Amino acid sequence: MALAKSLERKSHLVPGKFNISELFFEVPKDYSKPAAGTLRIFARSVKRAEKPANVDTEKEKKQLPWRVGGPGHECRSPQNYAFVNPILDKGYQMLFLDQRGTGLSTPISAATLALQGKPEEQADYLRLFRADSIVHDCEAIRKVLTDDYPEEKKKWSIMGQSFGGFCVVTYLSKFPEGLKEGRRTVGSHVPLSVLEAQSSTEKVIKRNEVYYRKYPEDVERVKIILSYLGQEPRSLPSGGMLTPRRFLQMGLGFGFHGCIDDVHEVVLRAHTNLTDFKLLTRSTLTTIDNFLKFDDHVLYWLLHEPCYCQRASSEWSAERVGKTFSQFDLNAEENPPYFTGEMVYSWQSEDYAELASLRETADIVSTISDWPDLYSSEQLAQNTVPLYSATYIEDMYVDYDFAMQTAAKIKGCKTFVTNVMYHNAITGKAAEVMGELMKLRDDVLD
């Protein structure tokens, strides 16, 4: 019996000669209890809008689903990704899938989560939004889309970035029979631990040092901004509060190409406001408000740590580890103010309007310790699905050593390693990354 059902398909043309189809599917909410309700999953399929003399049928195109990072982030429309053209040029058609709980796939917000009942019931519901359920959705959808394909055409290729790369390894562990090949751009599969949180914190410290070497004048500027916010936190257009700790969360983007310069622009703007007017203008507050999207992606806050746990609880791991580093002590006046990175904190429920009602739920989720395994070392050790991986030595979000440990566990994994790219290179340097991954696919290793 098919676990997924196709509900709707609408197609249209967009500039760039793309034919994009918008698809809705129905899948089980809980795959261990298929009769216990359903979720709707949204995806966009993209292929060339061309009419060659010898027309390839859809069945002759190689399907390639894309999984975005996160957790908790949806896909943009395909024409917004620079890597689409190189992939379509290789004869693929792509499927951009909004992972369950994101975008148009039964999205999770404070309001929709409240429909589940009390915080305990909300926490139980959130158990169903990790990588194991996501790859179940993908496999169920694959079977629907390829139902009338010849048997040799039913497998598809997959590709994922960051958390999406994590999902690729889960897919390899649980449903290798559905895969022709896989690609992942960063993404470790080491279960969350204090060691990993400590490594991530050390990476953030290094990126702060890079920031202040490039913009040494910002040490004093940031201190002035934090002093102002410490005396008078400001209301933000979204309804939240701009506090010193929230301002410093802008370091979340320090591991992206160009984001150090973006943070400097905000610091320069805010400092100039305080110099000229002794206040922050609405334009500046809006810029800061838009820098961090926790209100729009509550799943990221709720599951950012638990989504990597196996038979252990997260218990606000980064928050606990961060307290052991003096660099992040706001009361240590001799230190330059260090921005924080890709960490989530319990206090965010006080500073972000959309998170305010979710603190009890988040605390419950952080204490869950019976999370099931998300991958199988045994299956990965005997893997037969070709896997092509990109790993960045300077990645702030995925520890290089952990990433290489993951690659070593997967039989047949080919890895492109570089120290001149950052975490978002698949979008910032799409042509180079895709070129290297395609070389791994097309070349041989003697």
Image (tube, rainbow, N blue to C red):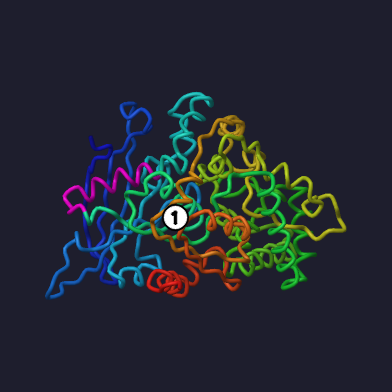
The percent coordinates of residue 18 (x first, y second) are 27, 67
Q: Main secondary structure of the magenta part?
A: helix
User: Where's the C terminus, which quadrant?
Assistant: bottom left
Q: Which residues are magenta?
A: 135-151
Residue visible at 42% across and 42% down in the picture: 101
Residue furthest front as drawn: 446
User: Where's the N terminus, which quadrant?
Assistant: top left
The quarter holding residue 387 reads: bottom left
Pick the residue in front: 319 or 287. 319
Secondary structure, mark 1, is loop
Residue 310: in magenta span: no
The percent coordinates of residue 192 (x first, y second) are 61, 44
Kindly identify the amino acid type of the residue bearing the numbered disc 1: Val
Q: Which residue is mark 1?
A: 68
The percent coordinates of residue 174 (x first, y second) are 40, 44
Residue 141: in magenta span: yes
In the displayed structure image, the side of residue 256 where residue 136 appears, left or right: left
Q: Is residue 389 above or below residue 374?
A: below
